Image (cartoon, rainbow, N blue to C red):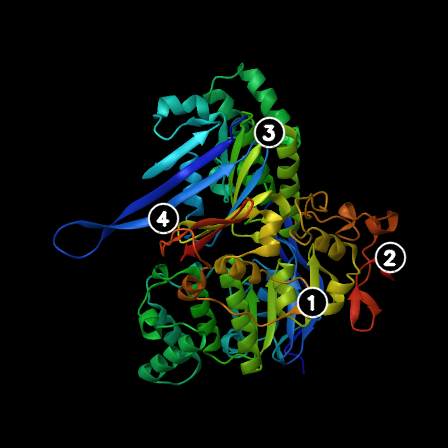
Amino acid sequence: MALVDIENLTVSFPQHSGVVQAVRGVTLRLNPGESLGIVGESGSGKSVTCMAVMGLLRQPPARITADKLELGGIDMLRASPRALAATRGKVAAMIFQDPMTAFDPVFTIGHQIVETIRAHRAQTRSQAWSEAEALLARVEIKSPEQVLACYSHQLSGGMLQRAMIAMALSSRPQILFADEPTTALDVTIQAQILALIKDLQAEFGMGLIMVTHDLGVIAETVDRVVVMYGGRVMEEGPVQDIFDAPAHPYTKALMGSIPGRLPGKQRLIEIPGASPNPADPPSGCPFHPRCPQADARCATTAPAFAAIAANRAAACWRLQ
Amino acid sequence: MTPPALELRALSKTFRLPQRGGLLPRTVAHHAVTEVSLTLPQNAILGLVGESGSGKTTTGMMAMRLIQPTAGQILLDGSDITNLDAAAMKPLRCKMQVVFQDSYSALDPMMTLCQIVAEPLHIHAIGTPSEQTEQALAMMERVGLHRSYGARYPHELSGGQRQRVAIARALILRPSVLVADEPTSALDVSVKAQIINLLLDLQAEMGLSILFISHDLSVVRSLTDSVAVMWGGRIVEQAATETIFADARHPYTRGLLDAIPVLNPRERRQRQFLTSAQIQAQIPRIAGRGATNKPQLVEVAPGHLVEAILQ
């Protein structure tokens, strides 16, 4: 059974000025123990997809439809609020980009981790406290008892991110969602946090969904990659294949625009134009206005997301 | 010989932070920057890299005379501006401008983009109002924003577009020096590439010299001619950009390079992360030449400076 099973998910948000179509038909799966990267730029729908399958989007305002939206075998579209609450945390936990806003500033870190542990398992306060201490030690925090007594503003970004990972692990989830967990961090701290996430994933046998705009993070951490753009999946495949031979023009362009790949001061290959406006997405393939290979068909009809090789799929007329 | 566009000589900054507790108010000294010397040649891009708290932003703000240094000198086009008062600085501000990381808080939300870009001209009383507007719109076009955006407000733009506005505002006075403090850090990959290309084009076209402050070594590699690495408020290594990538000598620089994600899943590896004590212990030691046992910058090859201990 897949840990995450999404088929044809759409998420939209009605606004005064029109309907924002954040996700427009996404299909993806995560198998037990597997790590999946969802890569895309702002507005590609990657975070909203995760929020939807975590049952974190309130309806209304969100409008969610899907042929299937399952998390740990539970139908997240039809589950009761009580079942949703039990699933979140227990089945899946999430860490966010900005740990400063993820913690409540008026309670200590210890208070919040203990609260999380006790929400999911019957434990005394002191049991939960010593477990929290052990968790902080596991995420390589040097003096756990001191950090537990701290408020979020007293800790650095890297420390807070470690504390948030500890909190996410406290309910022993089967799936960890990491939404841009290192974007706000320095490069050395980023490398440490990514190494930690990978180690913990192996140790706890969790599934991992790594959401990021950074292809470097993807290359370092996951087995399989889903590339999103304009609310749709553009390409999917094993991480090695995607880096060796990106198939979709958007993936190719994204790889070309990464700075520092080649030695020397030089212009980068840029993708002209801007990402599509989710309130007014282009007709046909969302990438066609910026695609060097687009033709008349791309502008009128969106290509189906279809297999292009073993284990690989893409949504592009040129590849079918 | 033309003087360098910007020169910092043994610049230091000590902040006095209030200390809690005790009966009498006391302060503790925090040495944010210690004796930093840098030369930004005419028409070049110098990268200043380091982690949060390394003092790179403080250095940039001192260079701009936005923070007063505790000691040292700042030379703009060869003339000392370290102790000029606000009135004497004002005409020189035309020659040095700054772009910040967070374009959202850098732009006044109550002003249209055209007003924002034209404001420096207004402040320095350059041209008539209609000329100022025309110049602002032309500069917006130059940075890749259509003239019709002139009537819009910052909140209507994406992050990349706002950063273009900030660059247009900085460049409208035709400065010779631009301090860019993490201007690409908050941007998406494809937008980042666009802004890097824009800075490269503008630098070549306008004869700009740029002090580019960043923690992102990948961006630094594509954009800069040379790099200075800061750690704990000091410069620990400085060289031509490719020399840093090919032949870093300082343990901190090597650690920084090692932490960059490798864009090939086949080359995944376990990394060793050095603590600052380990970095201290691994600082290169060079025999002879007047032992001081105190780390200092040593030229190990022409143009390649490394902090080392002379023994």
* Pointer 2 chain: A
For the residues bearing labels 3 and 2, Cβ distance under 8 angstroms: no
Identify which residue is drawn at 82% across, 48% down: A299
Mark 2 Cα shell of 10 Å, populated few (<14), some (14-19), many (≥20): some
B254 or B167: nearer the viewer? B254
Q: Amino acid at mark 2?
A: Arg
Q: What whole-number distance in Å separates the C-alpha atoms at marks 4 and 3? A: 40 Å
Mark 4 Cα shell of 10 Å, populated few (<14), some (14-19), many (≥20): some
A3 relative position to B106: left or right: right
Q: Amino acid at mark 1?
A: Val
Q: Secondary structure at mark 1?
A: strand
Q: Secondary structure at mark 4?
A: strand
Q: What whole-number distance in Å separates the C-alpha atoms at marks 3 and 2? A: 39 Å
Q: Secondary structure at mark 3?
A: helix
Q: Would residue A6 be seen by someone viewing this image from the given angle? A: no
Q: Amino acid at mark 3?
A: Gly
Label at residue B171: none
Question: What residue is pinned by disc 3?
Answer: B150
Q: Eyeballing the image, is B77 above or below B231?
A: above
Q: Would residue B127 be seen by someone viewing this image from the given angle? A: yes
Q: What whole-number distance in Å separates the C-alpha atoms at marks 3 and 1? A: 40 Å
Label at residue B32: 4
Q: Secondary structure at mark 2?
A: helix
Question: What residue is pinned by disc 1?
Answer: A225
B232 or B28: nearer the viewer? B232
Q: Are marks 4 and 1 on the same chain?
A: no
Q: What whole-number distance in Å separates the C-alpha atoms at marks 4 and 1? A: 42 Å
